[in-house]
Amino acid sequence: MGRASRFSGCPLLATGAFFAFQTLTGAAHADGGLYAGVKGARADGRAGAFVAKADDIAAVGINPAGLAKIGTTLIQLGNRFSYNQHTFLRNPTLDWSHQGQPPYTEFSKVSNGAPWQVLDPLLGVATNFGLKDWGFAAAVYSPAGVAREVYPDDGGQRYMMLRRNAQMINYSLSAAWKFKELFGLGVSLQWIAVPTLDYSLIIEGNPVRQAATNPVASSTDIRTSVKGTDLFTLNAIVGGWLRAAPFLEFGASAQVIPSAIQTKSNISVAAVNGTDPVTLTRGDKPADDVSLTLPLPITARLGVRYIQQKDGKELFDIELDGVYETWSRVDTFRLNANHLIGTYRKQEVPFDVVDIQKQWQNTIGVHLGGDLRIVDLFTARGGVYYETAASKPEYSNIDFAGGQHLGFALGGSLHISKLELAFAYEYRVQPTVRVSDASSKVYQQTPGNPCTPPYTDAVNCSSQYPGRPAPPVNGGEYFAYSHVMALDGIYRF
């Protein structure tokens, strides 16, 4: 947990966990909650293999250079509908809060109680303003990902997370230029807004020595919630493409600003059992404001596309993309409580700067997909992909599905005069991740516990968990999957 972990209980972990979730999404690209993926039904239907093709509004977030290929004015309006399930079965554990021989406690499997996500929109306009070799676009969209998760208050995951609600919006302005049909360059400037970020979990509020003996539930449990916003984070994507031959095209893009989301948040705390109040003060005055810093990764995409033409039109294409994301930038989430003091049962716990260990690792994704023109009125598409794990197994958490992922997609487009109706279905799965209690690195949060590193003090630390600050709580089995439907209307003038 690091040197500051003894004070990381309340909202710190809470908000941090969210990031794992999604932004991190537009902002976070890994998955589960971390999965941003791509937006747009045509890109979705190709399983994200769109870096070299990139010829609609989805280009603003994948490869803005593709906007120079559009050659006209188009309006694109779409939405994704998804069912996102994440389950966790905690390992049985000895409950040391009992006198005498501690009993083994078994847990029921918990599942996301809010799996449906029906609003995940995309709206954009692209035009060349009559300039033959140029393309411009403005777009507003929510990054693809899992915005809301709800788990039972008494479930085995209670010390990791109870609820999360995170809404994100990406505002993009893009421009692209091409040299004939040989190559193109483009850039997108993005304004990422987080209007809502709510997060809650249970911490163990026992302020006495050797308090870390209640791995299941405690009379001193405290429900901690964080609510915050960050209405402006700047990002940028640059890209290019090269037509090496009539049948061969390359594309590349990168998210280049090493930016971070910095929320302005408020904390609320309340005892789960009993009526003992929990107060937060700063300088002898009530206070509840904190800030959270969540670094965003640098993302690089590379694609190669084979094209088969007939009568001057594309008959089919096949594209292979690689995606590299530097999630190792996110080794911790940093919460700045600016000298808050929490008081519970007449015991004070100071909060200042807290680093929450995540120890994420860089990820690699491989995407293969393409289009096939069946007739002039209909185009079919499909694809498959694989992504390596963003989280090391010992740091697995219910806050996002951080293991390796597999997926496939199917889709198509119906062409009616100037209107294209594009649709896609995607299935994404994280195979079961198993974590033993011996290897787990996510611990119950005990901010009042005086046990400090190396956690072997016989006076202040629990003899049941030598070398650990508190009971491990993330040991168990994790499984996640998503069903996604996307529908876009694209009108070309």
Image (cartoon, grey):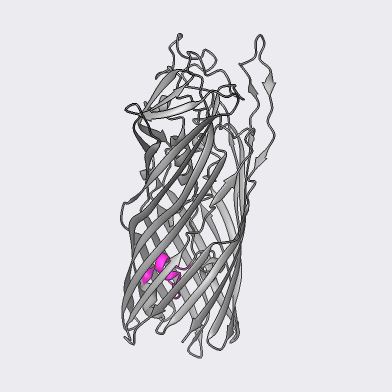
Span highlighted in magenta in the image: 50-64
Magenta-span inclusion, residue 56 = yes
Where residue 202 sits in the image (x, y, percent)?
A: 54, 31
Vertical relation: 238 (above or below) 416: above
Vertical relation: 326 (above or below) 409: above
The front one of 33 and 446 is 446
Q: Is residue 175 visible?
A: yes
Where residue 401 sits in the image (x, y, percent)?
A: 54, 46
> Main SS of the magenta segment?
loop
The front one of 353 and 289 is 289
Q: Residue furthest front?
A: 285
Magenta-span inclusion, residue 104 = no
What residue appears at the point 58 percent right and 57 percent down from the top-left corner? 407
What residue appears at the point 42 percent right and 65 percent down from the top-left corner? 62
Number of dots carrying numbers: 0
Compared across the picture, whether 17 is left or right of 218 comes to: left
Vertical relation: 332 (above or below) 169: above
Where residue 3 sits in the image (x, y, percent)?
A: 37, 26
Residue 477, located in which quarter of the rendered image?
A: top right
What residue appears at the point 58 percent right and 33 percent down from the top-left corner? 158
